Amino acid sequence: MRSLGERIGDWVAARFGRRRPPEAGPAVRVLQSTYYPSTGTSVSKLLNDDTVQTVMNLERELLLGASYRWTGEDAEATGVPDLLQAIERADGFDALLAAVAACRYTQYAVAEIIWQTDGGAWLPAAYRVLPRDACAISVDATGAVTGVVVTTTAGQVTLPPERAVVARHAPTPKEPTGHSVISDVREIIELKRRADHSVIRYLERFAAPSILAYYQPGATAEAKRQLLDALKELQSASVATLPGPKETAEVVLLEAKGGSGSSIGSAIEVLQLYEHRIARALLGSTLSIYEAQFGTRAQAETHLEVLKAVIRARQAAVEAVINQQVLQRVLEYNRADAGQLDVRFELNEPDFADRTAMSRWVTDLVSVGVLDPEADREAIRSMFGISR
């Protein structure tokens, strides 16, 4: 029988049209299991592509290159700066940031937190980023991480959640361990790899010129054999001897012709096309990354503004992992008021200063007498990042 409160709620809903709140907890659940790295053409194999590596390195520099800061009203509260310094000074903190930033491509990243006690405080001593293929993530019915199974030379070890930092990119009920954007360009990468292989085979066959030698009329069989053996010693692509029209022997180098209309030229153009398609899919734009072969400066600046917004969004994902899985744990282990503290880890935005616009701005200030080129020389130099 339903309780009195539930029956009153039903009457109120029927009388006034109010809807009952849903039951607590998720409706869609996932299989409670441990998810192991996939096999076949896995993400790890696709990550070895040179274009993907270039994009990953570029994005890592954009996200992390401007360093980080601790913000919030309580960042300078008594005892808090010591905890924050312990977090960032622990060995492997930069590697942890790089791994978390790359999980958009690697699908997930796992690092072990090695804790230590220092004067009664629980602080991280080091962060060890674990090999992706050695980690299997365990989840519960809601998709939350319950542990990490790590395969080592000593066997399998289970890391409890409090000892692990697990960064997952866009986990869903279908992909509880996260989604790699590399899988979205799997077909393009495979096509690029085939084109790359074709270029290598072409170069192996034709990079060294073929050699054709003409022997003089009336040459003996022994002379022909000696000429052919001499050509083979050059280890060229191919060699041949033919009767020549001249009285003396002649050696001719036959080199493959390149150019946009040749087979090798077409293959290189296809490779460039695949590289731009991969970069466009992963970065959302190529105009602000690759040299602008076509288009205007206004178009490039528009793409740059879009890139700034994209970078900030991706920085926020990195910040969330550090704030929730590192900073919050340190505060909870060492502060009774951890829930009331306003402290945050934030990445600095990269410097996209337009130096041409800055030069015009400085010139205008000098012309109206606000800046003195001599007295304010050091300030102007630091503004443009010029060292002494």
Image (cartoon, grey):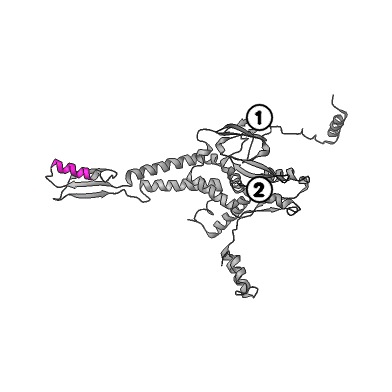
In the drawing, does residue 240 fall left or right of residue 71?
A: left
Q: Is residue 75 magenta?
A: no
Residue type, mark 2 in image: Glu
Q: Image height check: is 85 above or below 176?
A: below
Q: What is the chief secondary structure element of the magenta stretch?
A: helix
Q: Find residue 375 and report its horizontal and vertical position in percent.
A: 62, 74
Q: Image height check: is 214 above or below 4?
A: below
* Residue underneath mark 2: 319
The residue shown at (64%, 41%) is: 114
Check disc 2 and report its element: helix, strand or loop: helix
> Taking the image as drawn, is residue 167 in sight?
no
Give the residues drawn in magenta, as a range. 216-230
| Outermost residue toward the front in this view | 119
> Taking the image as drawn, is residue 356 in sight?
yes
State the CA–CA distance, disc 2 to disc 1: 28 Å
Residue type, mark 1 in image: Gln
Quadrant of the image for the C terminus?
Answer: bottom right
The residue shown at (52%, 59%) is: 296
Q: Is 7 in front, or is 370?
A: 370
Checking the image for residue 255, the label placed there is none
Q: Is 100 in front, or is 111?
A: 111
Check disc 1 and report its element: helix, strand or loop: loop
The residue shown at (15%, 51%) is: 248
